[in-house]
Amino acid sequence: MTDRVAAAVPGIRSAPLSELAFTVVDIETTGWAPEDAGITEIGAVRVQGGTMLAEFGSLVNPGIPVPEAITTLTGISDQMLISAPPVDDVLPRLLEFAEGSVLTAHNAPFDLRFLTAACAAMGRDWPGFEVLDTVRLARHLMATPQEVPDRKLATLARFFGTPVRPSHRALDDARATAVVLGELLGRLADREGIMTLEQLDTWLAARDAEAMAQAEAAREAQAAAAAPAAGGVSRTAERLAAIVPARFRLRVLRALGVAAAALPARSKTPA
């Protein structure tokens, strides 16, 4: 579940999720990689037990021009950032704000790449946060396309009716993500009985492995179905039976348009 980068707060992984503080963070940047882009805004919301405790927000002078396309997307311009503090001034305040909490973001690897790079550039060690990615959580708790067409923040915010809608501004997006997080944690407890970070770690790892196995089975099934073979559908079904795990077989067959009746029974290997 969590992408731990150092020793976390003692006992945090076994404490009830309902008692933990979460700092939901969002950043805006001049580009997509910290090697050639900088942070222009940081927003964060600290929540616990579904209650918002505090907010943090600041524009950040990245020291480089903001591309026109980014200004169009975020509304953040060079003019707005002239008097903004540099990241060296803002980041320590964010880390202090988030201390003792679970750091949370929507597509957390993106935000973490920039934040940890900025920390390293300052010569400062990155704290031992537990990091929760709401995209990863939504991937296993939100059905597509039955509930939502995708797991974008705007889509989830619309589905859950967040009071603040994402706007590609850091604090608004953090506020929306905080509400989405609360809804997802509620589903997690009600549907899966997950109550701690430790349990969530195990559950998410299992869901990730299952998703990877499904994707691999689908790729192999498509390759088998595309391969020329005498015997048509029945021959294809035999190939699928040989490579696709039983629990995924009917789903893959339906996706490929192969009738379930054409699938031969798979004999068990003697012990």
Image (tube, rainbow, N blue to C red):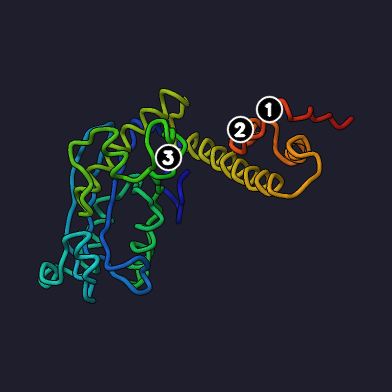
Query: Horizontal and vertical percent for residue 99?
Result: 30, 50
Eyeballing the image, is 167 above or below 83? above
Q: Amino acid at mark 2?
A: Arg
Q: Amino acid at mark 3?
A: Leu
Residue at screen point 20% across, 39% down: 53
Eyeballing the image, is 248 above or below 124? above
Query: Horizontal and vertical percent for residue 174?
Result: 25, 47
Quadrant of the image containing the C terminus: top right
- As measured in the structure, the alpha-carbon distance from the residue carrying label 1 to the one carrying label 2 is 7 Å
Q: Which residue is identified by label 1?
A: 260
Q: Compare marks 1 and 2 and give the one earlier in the sequence.
A: 2
Assign a secondary structure to mark 1. Answer: helix
Q: Compare marks 1 and 3 and give the one earlier in the sequence.
A: 3
Q: Which residue is identified by label 3?
A: 137
Q: Compare marks 3 and 2 and give the one earlier in the sequence.
A: 3
Left or right of 205? Residue 147 is: left
Eyeballing the image, is 162 above or below 9? above
